[in-house]
Amino acid sequence: MTIRTKLKSIPVGALFEEYCSESSVHGVRFFVGSQRSACVKLTWLTVFILSLGGCGVMIQQAYNKWDRTPVIVTLSEVPTPVWDMTFPAVTICPEIKVLNTRFNFTHAFETLQSEWYQMRRPKNFTFSVSDESIGKLKAIIHHCPGVYKHENNFIFNFNHVPEPERLVDFLRNVSLDRWGVFTMCSSTSDARCTNYMQVTLTNEGICYSFNMIPQEQMFHPDVLHHEYRYLDRWDDVGDGEPLSEPLLKVAGSGLDAAIGFNLIHYPLKIDTSCVVSNIGPSFSSVHPHELLLCQLLVQRGRGYKVLIHEPTVYPDLSKRNIRLSVSQTLTVALKPNIMMTSPELAKYSAQKRQCYFTHEHPLRFFRQYNQDNCELECLTNYTLQRCGCVHFSMPRANETRVCKLQEAHCPSTARGVLFIRKQHRNSTEDYLQQCDCLPACSSVRFDLQITQDSHTEEREVRTSIETEQELQARLQL
C-alpha cells in the first residue's frame, strides 16, 4: 500500500489532531486533546486566528510603505571637499527700476495725472505729455507696485496709446547703469568677477546674476523666441556671445573665500516713485554699498533683493529672496546640502523615489531639469492658458505674446491662483499635478545663516575723513 493510499485511509480529524499535537507552533497543540474543554480549544483557536490576521495587516502595511517610498535617504559618511563644488549663483535685483537721467518717470506721471484730473476740459484738450512718453510710462509700470495696476488708475484711460515696440530693450535702457552700480568686484578664486556676471531678465525686472550658466545652456534655442535675450553678457549686452569663463569654483570656506562687490547709488539720478516694495517719492542720500557673498551692506536709500541659487536655476525672486534693507550690514553663511541619488534607483518609478533624473522629465524651454525651472515653466503655461499672454520675463515661443499693461494684473493673479491650488491638489485642473515638478535626483540646496548689524552714516563719514594720527590718538585715550 502506498503512502498516498495510507493517508487517504486515515480520517481527517485524526490527521489534524496528530499535526496539532506534534506541531512546534506555539498554541496549536491546545486546539486538540481530550483533557481540554471545548471552551479552551475555542479560545486558543480564536487567539491564533486573530494573531494571523494581525500579522497579515502588518505585512500589508509594510508592503504599502515600501511600495510608496522604496527609497530611504541617508547621510553620506564620505565628506566632500568644498573646493570641489561650483560656487552658487547670486542674483541681485535693485528695487529702484528707473534712472531719471534716461526717463523722468515721476515728472511725466505726475504731470499726466494732474492734467487728466483737471476736469471740465474741452474735448480737444491736448496733453503736454506726448504719446511716446505715455507709452514709456505704461512700459515702466509693468514692474511697478500693484497699486499702479489697479483698475481705477487713470493710466488705463490711455490704453489706445501703444507701448514701446521693443518693451524689454526700453526697460533695460532706463534701468540702473550696471557699471554705475557695480564699481568693483573681487574674489579669492578669480579677481575678474565680471567675467562671471550677466544681466538677467526676471519677474523683478532687470537684475544682475553672478556665476549662472549662459542663455545658450539654459534654454532650448529652437523653441525660445528671438525678440530679446533673458541672459546677456556683462561687458557687451545684446551681442549674443557665450560667457568667456566656465562657472567659478569655490576656493575654500569662510570670509577669505568670499565674493565681494561694491554697489553705488547716486540719489539725484534715481527715480524712487516706481519701487517694487514701496510707492511714493522718497529722497535720501546714498553712499557706496559693499556686498560680499558672506557680507552684505546697503546704505541709506532703497535696497536690493538677493537670491542665492544653483547656477542651472533660472531666478524667480517671488518665491524666496533676501532683502538688503537700508543702513544694515548682513553676514550670510552658506551651508550646502547635496543630494545625490544612486543610479541603481533608476529601475524604480519617479513617483516612488520622489525625484527625476536629468533625462526623465524633459522641459520645453529649459535644457536642464530642476524643480524651480519646472515650476516656472508650469506657471508660464498656466498664465498663457488663463490670460492668453505671459509676463515679459517668462520664457515663451514666437507665437506667444507679452501681456500689455491693461492685462498686467492677470499674470499676478495667475501666480496667486496657482499657489492656492498648490495647497489643494484634488482638482483635475491642478496644473502643478499635471506638470509633476518633483525635485531633481541630484541637487544642491543652501541653508542660510544671516546676521545683521546697523551701519550708520555718521560712522562711515567719520571713518572716511579720519587721519591715521587722529585714529591712533583716539585709540590711546
Image: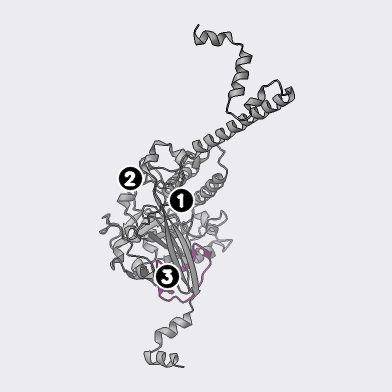
The CA span between labels 2 and 1 is 26 Å
The CA span between labels 2 and 3 is 36 Å
Query: Where residue 21 sits: x, y (%)?
Result: 61, 23
Q: Is residue 87 visible?
A: yes
Disc 3, SS: strand
Q: Is residue 10 above or below residue 95?
A: above
- Disc 2 vs disc 1: which is toward the camera? 2
Q: Are the residues at dot 2 and dot 1 in contact (C-beta closer than 8 Å)?
A: no
Q: Amino acid at mark 3?
A: Gln
Q: Earlier in the sequence, mark 2 or mark 1?
A: 2
Q: Is residue 453 above or below residue 407?
A: below
Q: Are the residues at dot 3 and dot 1 in contact (C-beta closer than 8 Å)?
A: no
- Residue at which label 1 appears: 404
Range of the magenta residues? 266-294
- Residue at which label 3 appears: 295
Q: Earlier in the sequence, mark 3 or mark 1?
A: 3
- Give 469 or 252, whichever is nearer the viewer: 252
**Relative horizontal placement of residue 473, taking residue 48 as reference (left or right):** left
State the residue at coordinates (51%, 49%). 415
Q: Is residue 134 visible?
A: no
Query: Where residue 435 sits: x, y (%)?
Result: 46, 41
Query: Where residue 440 sits: x, y (%)?
Result: 41, 46
Specify the label residue 220 is tagged with. Answer: 2
